[in-house]
Amino acid sequence: MSAFYLTVHDDAVQILTDGAVYTEDGTLLDIASKIRPIGDLPLAMTARGTLVPFDVLAPALDLVAGAGSVDGVMKYLETILAKPQRRRDLSTTAFQAVLVGISEQHGPFARMFASVDMPGIEAFLLYDVAPESAGGPEVSIEELPFTGADYEAAGVFALQRYGVAIMEAMRRKPGPNPAMPDLPELYGIGGHVDLTVVHAGGVTTARLHEWPDRIGEKINPFAADAAAIAAE
């Protein structure tokens, strides 16, 4: 399933990502970074479902990034997504890709596209993402170990302080595999929690948390709870 949670601010974009790479039945294959900087620009990409955009799109975007313009890269991406051959190359699996960056003309932004039609979304069209958005299971403030007032008071430090709790709550809810939505729901958020900040100076990523998930096994978000109870 994988997950992201992002916030767009006046001078930066912050995004939380996990690290689980798994088979169609939820068996963990690898733990990897799911944030991909584009060139040396204040621009980065993440994906849910598969990492096909990293392999197919990112190298081409890196080349365009050499010209030094985020707006130029995004314009080029629109051109790529409009080409039938590129769409076929990217249609091997279902995925959702999100790009976060600092536009020379418009400032901080988050935009997304998908390789398949989704509710309210046409495949391969770029859409603006709301200033606070998530991909993954929905979590209400009542399910989190902090209040809405706490979160608001934290301001730009909210994801640094509460990001692990947000991702932990999402991790504990099963959901569909974005690459194979017709299969049974699974627990697909795991590995680690990364917080990436995209600002005028570039892209920085910090590891906030690591979960004890094991490659070759299915993700069990409640395993640590059981171990703690057994140790009491």
Image (cartoon, rainbow, N blue to C red):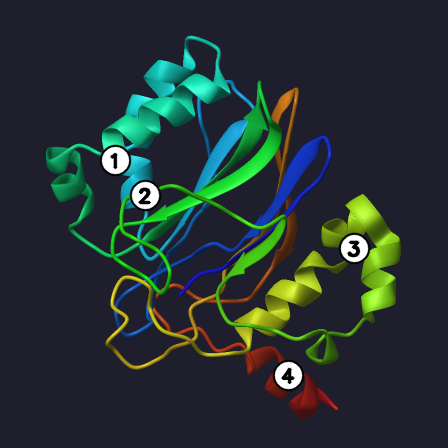
Q: Position of residue 209 (x, y in %)?
A: 64, 56
Which residue lies under the disc numbered 1?
81
Mark 3 to mark 1 CA distance (whole Å): 36 Å
Mark 4 to mark 1 CA distance (whole Å): 44 Å
Labels 1 & 2 near each other (Cβ < 8 A): yes
What amino acid type should be assigned to the residue bearing mark 4?
Answer: Asp
- Depth check, front residue: 219 or 172: 172
| Mark 3 nearby-residue class (10 Å; few <14, some 14–19, many ≥20) | some
- Report the disc number at residue 225: 4
Which residue lies under the disc numbered 2?
125
What amino acid type should be assigned to the residue bearing mark 2?
Answer: Leu
| Mark 1 nearby-residue class (10 Å; few <14, some 14–19, many ≥20) | many
Q: Earlier in the sequence, mark 1 or mark 2?
A: 1
Q: Position of residue 170 (x, y in %)?
A: 56, 70
Mark 3 to mark 2 CA distance (whole Å): 34 Å
Query: 101 left or right of 56?
Result: right
Mark 4 or 1, closer to the camera? 1
Which residue lies under the disc numbered 3?
161
Picture quadrant of residue 127: top left
Query: 183 left or right of 201?
Result: left
Picture quadrant of residue 11: top right
Q: Earlier in the sequence, mark 4 or mark 1?
A: 1
Q: What kind of element bears circle 1?
A: helix
